[in-house]
Amino acid sequence: MTRVLVIGHGMVGARFLAELRARQVPDLDLGVLGEEPHRPYNRLLLADALTGAHGLADLTLPETPGVSVMSGRRATAINRADKVVTDDAGGDHPYDVLVLATGAAPRFPAVDGLVGPGDRPLPGVTALRTWDDALRVRSHLTDGSRVVVLGGGLLGVETARAIARGGTEVTVVHRQPQPLDRQLDPMSGAVLRAALADLGVTTRTGVRIAHVTRGPDHIQELRLSDGSTLPADLVVVAAGVRPRTRLALAADLWVHHGVLVDAVGATDDPHIFAIGDCAEPASGCQGLVGPGWEQARVLADELADRLGGVPARRETASVDTSVVRLKAEGLDVVTMGTLPADDLDPSGPRVVSLVDLAGRRRVRVAVRDGRITGATCVGDPQVAADLTVAFENRFPVPDDPAALLARPLSERASPASVADLPAHATICRCNAVSKDAIVRAIGDGAASLEAVAASTRATTGCGTCTGQVCALLEAGTPSAPARAAS
Ligand SMILES: Cc1cc2nc3c(=O)[nH]c(=O)nc-3n(C[C@H](O)[C@H](O)[C@H](O)COP(=O)(O)OP(=O)(O)OC[C@H]3O[C@@H](n4cnc5c(N)ncnc54)[C@H](O)[C@@H]3O)c2cc1C
């Protein structure tokens, strides 16, 4: 009997259990310790839960049979000499193979009044990382409440938009000069700021929280670094995450930002592996579910190889992780590749752009050697879809690249057609599923979204590919030839 123990029953730990179970390893004793009291759920959709649009049951991930699940139990120590993990209830769990999937924890800025000893958030301050965090935020969204979201990156903007949808007054406080400063140039940031304002989200940029006035169990007011004040009942912190490595550090494993691992997830201890947000492979910590799910798949194959199972090497689509899409209703923001710091630099790529503040629209595209090397699109989902397809598939651009900035009026009703994509095009980025894999699943009898998801896993991550999968289902299948974007 081989005892495989997983610490962390989140998105990647749960996926690893499913992947390993599917490989029919003989005499396997599979167990998982999960600190959260719930079954694993889709963390990517937590912002949607703020409005009550999703209950926990809607987000819950499928269960893997034959796994001993220990929920509400936190691993507190790894004894590498005896190969035993201890939990916070005093239980001991022997292992032959240990997989760390402890994820990442939100960073809280060390501001008096926001955090207490050990940088723990004080009442009235929370992150949005867990289902319990979502419930905490939701409980504050009452009539007249005022929420401040600290951090104007992707998670901060998505969270603020979700809060505003419920009618609550929300302000984003961001240290940088504009929201999404890592993804957007200043003009795109200005357009996004205006679009956010239309949706009830105020942005205060270039400032930080200097002082917090609070009662014993609630926040009253924030003073910002420019001297202005903001009344607030709740502060939601979206200021980044750090890999959860405490257990690994205490066990003397090699840790840099995350637990250092090789290409199959092995740490410097041959019996211990790490995957997901807690792990640091050669490519670095990405904090994205797609790479974590890929690590889970690779490790399951590796262990199946070693333990006499059936490796299930599945063809995966190539995923360019530079493509970033905001998941916020009514806000279309997509960025990809790299754009130059200076659009007028003659040694850089050719850059064409459009800015339309009144139309809440901004498109900027860099082209070199007839291909898109980077693009940003705010406020035009059809153009964003076309740019993403052309970028990911390296389609040739038109002779006049300005044609990429807006769709001709005659075409505006139909977004980039999935039928036109080549077979190898990536549809589900979280699960690296190609159009071809989906078309084959439909051909094999998957007749609904649920059936395609069960067969290929497409749509089970951030869900932004759902429209394309539906279009493939409606089309009924046949694969069209590659389209040249000229
Ligand atoms: C609101 C939100 C939106 C996001 N949107 C996107 C997105 O659009 N695209 C994208 O790619 N990524 C997104 N992410 C990031 C994505 O959720 C993570 O990359 C993914 O969840 C990583 O999976 P994981 O299993 O490594 O970590 P987690 O899902 O965090 O799971 C780790 C689990 O381990 C548990 N644990 C930790 N320590 C212990 C211990 N000692 N004992 C027992 N259990 C322990 C934790 O409680 C947790 O349940 C988003 C994250 C959030 C919060």
Image (cartoon, rainbow, N blue to C red):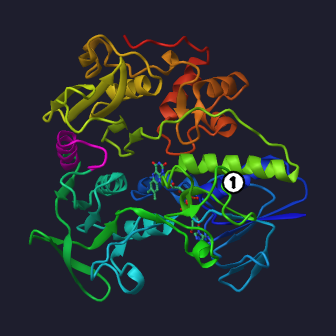
- Residue linked to disc 1: 16
Q: Residue furthest left?
A: 227
Residue 54 in view (yes/no): no
Residue appearing at x 54%, y 30% in the figure: 426
Q: Quadrant of residue 210?
A: bottom left
* Magenta stretch: includes residue 190: yes
* Magenta stretch: includes residue 226: no
Magenta stretch in the rendered image: 180-197
Residue 165 position, x and y percent, is 31, 52
166 on left or right of 84: left
The correct choice, above or below, for 124 with respect to 38 in the image is below
Badge 1: residue crowd in 10 Å (few <14, some 14–19, many ≥20): many
Q: Nearer the viewer, residue 443 or 15?
A: 15
Secondary structure mostly seen in magenta is helix
Q: Residue furthest bottom?
A: 216
Q: Quadrant of residue 63?
A: bottom right
Q: Quadrant of residue 88?
A: bottom right
Quarter of the picture containing the C terminus is top left
Residue appearing at x 61%, y 18% in the figure: 476
Secondary structure, mark 1, is helix
Q: Nearer the viewer, residue 460 or 399?
A: 399
**Amino acid at circle 1:** Phe
Residue 114 in view (yes/no): yes
Residue 274 position, x and y percent, is 64, 61
